[in-house]
């Protein structure tokens, strides 16, 4: 009996998510590229200007355990530098495991101060990706590390971290759905999504995209459907984690839902897209000898140099990421819409690959 | 056929560690979830926002909240400014939470008077930008508006001051 349970557990943990070394490596590059050049690394410099009277860190957190106020600006500068250096290390696959772990630790350290003023952005599930994936084989090819040890192309990668990330994502969405279920979202006389729309539209002035259209919708069945759908979708993730196909289906819904949230509520969550991409990677063909050929020609000093240039650009308020260019040029949040639409495009492409039988699902 | 464990050559003993991780994560999540709802939100945590505490609209009503900052001068006059003016150093997404956390009355606020040394001076210096004289106090007023969704256009049918938080700059 125990042997059978262990076999079932092993099959789920080690085999259900099957990815090649190249697919894992492609994901590594996409993740670091997205964080560096689309979202951009956040600055912590503004914390220097806040008085310690505002310091009220989450309990427990690194900030609450070891500090009684905001650290000096120099400390936060070092943290920023480590985050950037780690991301370039991940991008080029240089000491990949070390920099993957360092990235998550530095983000958690820095954010424990940024979140000490009352608002906690729930982006940890994205920041934890490198820490978890450090134990996959995402640095084994298409990397500077691979110059020392070449793997046979197309070999199966170490993918239990992908399963773990699916569990983390499933639990995170469940944590959002359960309070809704218990908090009255399913009552037929309440319209929670409409309430949220109303607040964002009238109080925070989020009136772009399709918000003016949705604010006029009076049909109760529509808003009740939105409430019920949201709760069912968020709670359903916990069951979906046991089957990659079902999980991908839920991730696909999430991509469409996130676009809908952007259009309706003008709330964007593009930070979550690197996480969504992880679960599409097994379906995306990745074969290229050129990438490793390129990595073979990259000297190691490029990584600290790139990190210094990036950090200097940030300090000088130069738009180092697409999101910054967005604020800089237009003042309108246009990039989130483009990223959302691109994600939907990727999803349709992946589905078409599956339909044409080019990839096993 | 046995499962291919680790193509990078890790020792087989670590397989139990990994299995243990997948088992332990469930009770850890449960403890974290209960802690969040009973005590407060830890960081880091595997959580996403629920918005379950948001004002829920009904068929007829929806609710919004406005925060106003009144800077008071010695002659009794007051100047109204916004939280965006006062907290311009902080990113916009943080400002409302900072107000609620630090500049509201219990039970909403996380910090209680007496405030930290220098906090009054910081607030006073930031408020001084909005008045010509010397500010002596600030008052933060939280107002909840009730909207009637059955009217066209949607109309405000009620407003209630839910909190007045005054800080004297001594």
Image: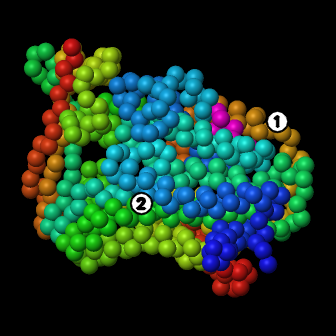
Residue position marked by numbered label 1 in the rendering: A301
The 10 Å Cα crowd at callout 1, few under 14, some 14 to 19, many 20 or more, is few
Q: Is residue A41 magenta?
A: no
Q: In the rendered view, does A50 fall on the left or right side of B80?
A: right
Q: Is residue A83 magenta?
A: yes
Q: In the rendered view, does A340 fall on the left or right side of B150?
A: right
The x and y percentages for residue B97 are 33, 41
Q: Is residue B20 above or below residue A232?
A: above
- The chain that hosts pointer 2 is A
> Overall secondary structure of the magenta stretch?
helix
The 10 Å Cα crowd at callout 2, few under 14, some 14 to 19, many 20 or more, is many
Q: Secondary structure at mark 1?
A: loop
Residue position marked by numbered label 2 in the rendering: A175
Q: Secondary structure at mark 2?
A: helix
Q: Is residue A220 above or below residue B78?
A: below
The C terminus of chain A is located in which quarter? Answer: bottom right
Tell me which residue sits at (33%, 74%) in the image. Answer: A228
- The chain that hosts pointer 1 is A
């Amino acid at each position: 009996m125990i042997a059978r349970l262990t076999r079932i557990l092993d099959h789920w943990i080690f085999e259900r998510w099957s990815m090649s070394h190249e697919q894992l490596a492609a994901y590594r590059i996409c993740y670091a590229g997205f964080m560096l050049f689309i979202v951009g690394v956040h600055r912590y410099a503004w914390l220097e200007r806040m008085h310690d009277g505002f310091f009220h860190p989450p309990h427990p957190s690194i900030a609450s355990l070891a500090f009684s106020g905001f650290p000096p600006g120099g400390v936060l500068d070092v943290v920023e530098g480590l985050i950037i250096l780690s991301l370039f290390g991940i991008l080029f696959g240089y000491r990949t495991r070390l920099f993957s772990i360092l990235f998550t630790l530095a983000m958690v350290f820095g954010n424990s101060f940024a979140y000490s003023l009352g608002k906690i952005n729930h982006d940890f599930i994205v920041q934890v990706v490198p820490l978890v994936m450090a134990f996959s084989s995402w640095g084994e090819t298409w990397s500077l590390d691979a110059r020392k040890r070449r793997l046979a192309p197309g070999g199966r990668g170490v993918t239990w971290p992908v399963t773990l990330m699916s569990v983390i994502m499933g639990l995170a969405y469940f944590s959002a759905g359960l309070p809704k279920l218990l908090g009255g979202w399913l009552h037929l006389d309440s319209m929670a999504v409409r309430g949220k729309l109303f607040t964002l539209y009238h109080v925070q002035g989020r009136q772009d995209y399709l918000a003016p259209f949705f604010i006029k919708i009076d049909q109760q069945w529509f808003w009740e459907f939105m409430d019920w759908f949201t709760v069912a979708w968020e709670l359903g993730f916990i069951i979906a984690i046991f089957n990659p196909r079902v999980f991908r289906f839920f991730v696909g819904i999430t991509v469409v839902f996130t676009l809908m949230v952007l259009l309706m509520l003008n709330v964007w969550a593009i930070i979550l897209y690197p996480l969504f991409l992880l679960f599409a990677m097994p379906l995306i063909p990745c074969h290229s000898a050129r990438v490793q050929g390129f990595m073979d020609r990259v000297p190691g000093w490029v990584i600290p140099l790139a990190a210094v240039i990036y950090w200097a650009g940030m300090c000088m308020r130069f738009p180092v990421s697409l999101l910054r260019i967005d604020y800089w040029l237009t003042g309108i949040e246009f990039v989130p819409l483009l990223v959302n639409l691109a994600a939907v495009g990727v999803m349709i492409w992946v589905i078409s690959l599956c339909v044409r039988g080019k990839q096993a699902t | 056929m046995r499962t291919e464990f680790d193509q990078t050559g890790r020792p087989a003993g670590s397989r139990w560690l990994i299995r243990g991780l997948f088992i332990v994560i469930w009770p850890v999540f449960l403890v974290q979830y209960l802690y969040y709802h009973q005590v407060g939100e830890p960081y880091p945590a595997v959580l996403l926002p629920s918005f379950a505490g948001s004002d829920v609209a009904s068929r007829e009503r929806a609710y919004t909240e406005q925060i106003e900052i009144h800077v008071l001068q010695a002659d009794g006059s007051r100047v109204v400014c916004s939280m965006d003016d006062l907290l311009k150093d902080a990113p916009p997404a943080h400002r409302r939470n900072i107000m609620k956390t630090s500049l509201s009355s219990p039970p909403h606020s996380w910090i209680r008077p007496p405030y930290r040394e220098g906090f009054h001076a910081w607030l006073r210096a930031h408020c001084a930008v909005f008045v010509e004289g010397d500010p002596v106090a600030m008052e933060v007023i939280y107002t909840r508006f009730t909207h009637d969704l059955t009217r066209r256009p949607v109309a405000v049918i009620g407003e209630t001051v839910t909190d007045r938080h005054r800080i004297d700059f001594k």
